[in-house]
Amino acid sequence: MELLPFWKNFSTTQRTPRILILISLTLIILGLIPLYHPFYRYPANLVVDHSSKITSPLPYGSATKDQKIKITEQDEGTCNVFIGNWVPNPDAPYYTNTTCWAIHEHQNCMKYGRPDTEFLKWKWKPKGCDLPIFNPYQFLDMMRNKSMAFIGDSVGRNQMQSLICLLSRVEYPIDISYDADQNFKRWKYTTYNFTLAAYWSPYLVTVKESDPDGPSHTGLFNLYLDEPDPKWASQIEQFDYLIFNSAHWFTRCSVYYEKNQIIGCRYCGLPNVTEVPINYAYQKALKTTLKAINSLDKFKGVTFLRTIAPSHFEGGEWNKGGNCVRKSPFRSNETTLDSISSEFYKTQVEEFKVAAEEGKKKGKRFRLLDMTQAMWLRPDGHPSKYGHWPNANVVLYNDCVHWCLPGPIDTWSDFFLHMLKLEGRRALEEKLQLK
Ligand SMILES: *[C@@H]1O[C@H](CO)[C@@H](O)[C@H](O)[C@H]1NC(C)=O
Ligand SMILES: *[C@@H]1O[C@H](CO)[C@@H](O)[C@H](O)[C@H]1NC(C)=O
Ligand SMILES: *[C@@H]1O[C@H](CO)[C@@H](O)[C@H](O)[C@H]1NC(C)=O
Ligand SMILES: *[C@@H]1O[C@H](CO)[C@@H](O)[C@H](O)[C@H]1NC(C)=O
Ligand SMILES: *[C@@H]1O[C@H](CO)[C@@H](O)[C@H](O)[C@H]1NC(C)=O
């Protein structure tokens, strides 16, 4: 299959039986091309919704009440917009693959024959209030003379492309990238003098691929858990808004370094290197990332940390026939979050709080773009087998990680605009307080 410019070429050679066994024993992500393809093991055992009875229609075990996790309350107003349900929206979608050119090939589900369209027709209804549908004019108006960067993995890119498509009703950006590297794009909305940039940094910390093949044929990565990735860390001071994301890549085979010394690894198969829990590594990496932002003296922007968007493999792991074939959302009382996503989520919330507290002292603003619950309820929003032609030779045949465009990820811009408006209100309040 033709590799797309946005996808880092990733070697995907034949597997030997030994490797197959290793793969089946470990929880690794297999790289299709540049993406991360998590290979989450169910059972689900944590509950996102904390208001209702737990039942699980999934064949992966059940949850217990005391394992519930709470979605963080925003400190704004009385309504937490991140808790709610999906409700029908006959007006959606707001673009198609013929009106928007920014749709990534592997997320162009309609092109590859997805037959159902119900998944396009939902909007988010927070409990106790409403979340307005994204208004591209309002967004661009607020972004006059501003700049924004997406930093993270391909789900972050998925979000950026969704935003470009939603904005395409008003204007398309021009490409002002510094070079041809598709992992570092820069766009300009000339009418609004608004700059949008993307930084590819799936681990957020410094990484060196020590072996493109590795024990699982998904690469072996040396992660320097205490060093922020200079690819973004040296570039972000100029931006007004940063949107960070990470998680899925951490399930791959890696060797962990601190102070330049190996401290352990994850399924690296190296002698005398001990296994370290994934969560230790993730927490450390996220801490490093957020600390780096807090220590940038010149950075005056707002940092959004987007929480994990869970994948939805059912009936097996990603390489064992797992698939996502549902055609409509769950209600919040119908499902539970899987344990790996829950762990990532908890780490994100914890580290966010630590950084936000520290940031307050330094005049830095951190916000949580808390998408986990909304997206866990959307098993119907992934490409599944409609991210490529049926005969394509792809490693991850059923993509239950990324999101079709158009699709539920468009809703992230509803949340994002809502948060930007709150930001404006806060700034105004701060001004008034100073008077
Ligand atoms: C858009 O989707 C339609 C099916 O709805 C498909 O026939 C067409 O090839 C797609 N066009 C592009 C440009 O992706
Ligand atoms: C944008 O920048 C231009 C030039 O510096 C200035 O004239 C204009 O007022 C600015 N607009 C906004 C909304 O800040
Ligand atoms: C565009 O915005 C930047 C700030 O991001 C500002 O310095 C510059 O003057 C603006 N240019 C115009 C033409 O408005
Ligand atoms: C592993 O550790 C043992 C005991 O300390 C040592 O004898 C051996 O040489 C080490 N192997 C490697 C490959 O470092
Ligand atoms: C979930 O809530 C809906 C609406 O409140 C209700 O109709 C449905 O029966 C509930 N489902 C379960 C499994 O509790």
Image (cartoon, rainbow, N blue to C red):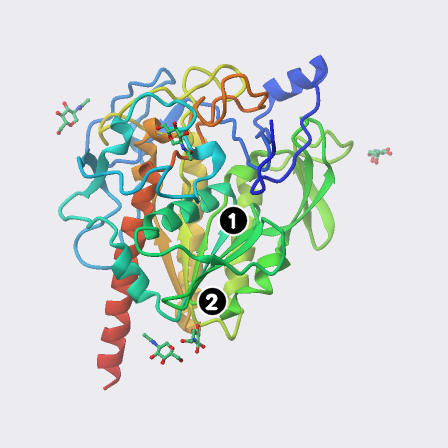
Disc 2 residue crowd, few under 14, some 14–19, many 20+, Cα 10 Å: some
Q: Is residue 411 visible?
A: yes
- Amino acid of disc 1: Gly
What x and y, as percent, mark residue 21?
65, 15
361 and 314: which is toward the camera: 314
Which residue, given by chain and number where applicable, does mark 1 sit on? 152
Q: CB atoms at circles 1 and 2 under 8 Å apart?
A: no
Is residue 325 depicted above or below 432 in this figure? Answer: above
What x and y, as percent, mark residue 27?
56, 27
What x and y, as percent, mark residue 364?
42, 69
Disc 1 residue crowd, few under 14, some 14–19, many 20+, Cα 10 Å: many
User: Where ligand 5 lies, by quadrant?
Assistant: top left
Q: Quadrant of residue 343?
A: top left
237 and 76: which is toward the camera: 237
Tell me the number on the disc at residue 239: 2
Q: Helix, strand, or loop for circle 1? A: strand
Is residue 261 depicted above or below 340 in this figure? Answer: below
Q: Residue furthest left?
A: 128
- Amino acid of disc 2: Phe
The quadrant in which the C terminus is found is bottom left
Q: Quadrant of residue 331?
A: top left
Left or right of residue 202, residue 325 in this image? left
Q: Is residue 329 visible?
A: no
Q: Quadrant of residue 424?
A: bottom left
Is residue 204 depicted above or below 5 in this figure? Answer: below
- Residue visible at 76% across and 32% down in the picture: 270
Left or right of residue 259, residue 141 in this image? left
